[in-house]
Image: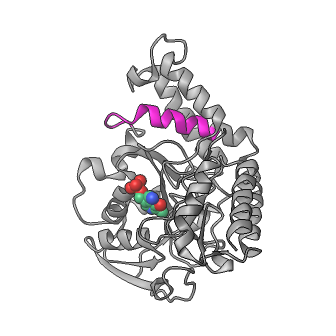
Amino acid sequence: MKSYNFYAGPAILPEKVLKKAQQAVGNFADMNLSILEISHRSKQFTAVMEEAEELVRSLLNLSDEYAVLFLTGGASSQFYMSAMNLLNKKAAFLDTGTWSAKSIKEAQKFGEIDIVASGKDKAYTYIPKDFNLSPDHEYLHITSNNTIFGTQWHEFPDVDIPLVCDASSDIFSRPLDLSKFGMIYAGAQKNVGPAGTTLVIIRKEMLGKVDRQIPTMLDYNTHIEKKSSFNTPPVFPIYVCMLVFRWLRENGGLEAMEAHNKKKATILYDTLDSSELFYGVVDKADRSLMNVTFKIKDDSLNDAFNQLAEENGCIGVKGHRSVGGFRASIYNAMSVEGIEKLCEVIQNFEAKYA
Ligand code: PMP
């Protein structure tokens, strides 16, 4: 039986990428060595790093104003690293869930943070869009897709200060107008590749404006100067990310991905909306195309549904432990076939229990 991977992260990767990665573990670039054992200074790996950066640049139409970095420490390290490098006195943050709350907590260690709006009043089931900024806000931090709650910014806020954005769970799922962003960061393990590297895209003019001393490893300028190889980068994860970027390009780039993602999410949300037993948790306008959160009206049926899903090869649909219910993570590599399978399971379950 085929398994369909609905895990939130680490998450599904394209089959073609996994096959190529397997080959590289055996023999990489005809070196008769494994990708796991080659030097990060070898010309073969330098070529991977360069191609990965080039592909990010072309997929996102990035100009030279932006640096592209592959770092470590997960998106969680970017919560403090971004503030350490960018925040002098005061910044504005939008609180749209667990991950933005964590980013706020870390940034507060480096300056004054105004939480200009929060979705906490309704258990983060919507994106708060009414807020005011003041002239002394140096940037606005947002989380583009809230992995746990299943909300997503569909139109980014129109503000005249730079956006700093945690895009861990929706980067490369749609085209982005980069001109609004001073910085974007994303842990790789959802829509980009395996766990182990974090993509950072930063407008270089954002840097050099803070007064504090920054440890060498935490200074973006270090990694810009050394092309993400100041210390040993995670060679294998970066290689797999590069394969994913190739796959994105071969499959039509980000416009095509957006159409594919919209199609999948529509099929799943329509199934939930026409159900008498299941319901989508978040406001329709803010529904995520990446993480579809839903519940059963009678939650004593949760275990039975989870079991049926697993019996049918739909793995990882359990909601985050902090919110319960269900969550289908349907990143770029999820097929329409996988969505149809999950919808079939939902409908069969409903036929039995509604
Ligand atoms: N931000 C978001 C939106 C996330 O979904 C996650 C991980 N689930 C994180 C940050 C934390 O990422 P990491 O585990 O790479 O530190």
Q: Does 261 sit left or right of 196 as displayed?
A: right
Residue 243, x across and y down, in percent: 59, 34
Q: Is residue 318 magenta?
A: no
Q: Which quadrant is home to the N terminus?
A: top right
| Stretch of the chain drawn in magenta | 229-245
Residue 234 falls within the magenta-colored stretch: yes
Q: Can residue 171 be seen from the camera position used here? A: no
Vertical placement of residue 116 versus 237, above or below: below
Quadrant for ligand 1 reads bottom left
Say how many tags the image has.
0
Residue 289 screen position, x and y as percent: 66, 64
Question: At 58% from the left edge and 51% from the top edge, which residue is drawn?
Answer: 310
| Residue at figure coordinates x 45%, y 18% from the top left | 34
Q: Going by the picture, which residue comes out furthest to the top?
A: 32
Give the x, y percent position of residue 308: 61, 56
Left or right of 155 in this view: 117: left
Above or below, 46 against 246 in this view is above
Quarter placement of the C terminus: bottom right
Magenta: predominant secondary structure element? helix
Asked if residue 175 is positioned above or below residue 236 in the image, the reply reads below
- Pick the front one: 8 or 201: 8
Residue 297 shows in this picture: yes
Residue 247 location, quadrant: top right
Foreground residue among 40 and 153: 153
Q: Is residue 143 above or below residue 81?
A: below
Q: Position of residue 181 (x, y in %)?
A: 54, 65
Please state if 56 lies on the left or on the right of 284 as rendered: left
Q: Which corner quadrant of the image does residue 295 belong to?
A: bottom right
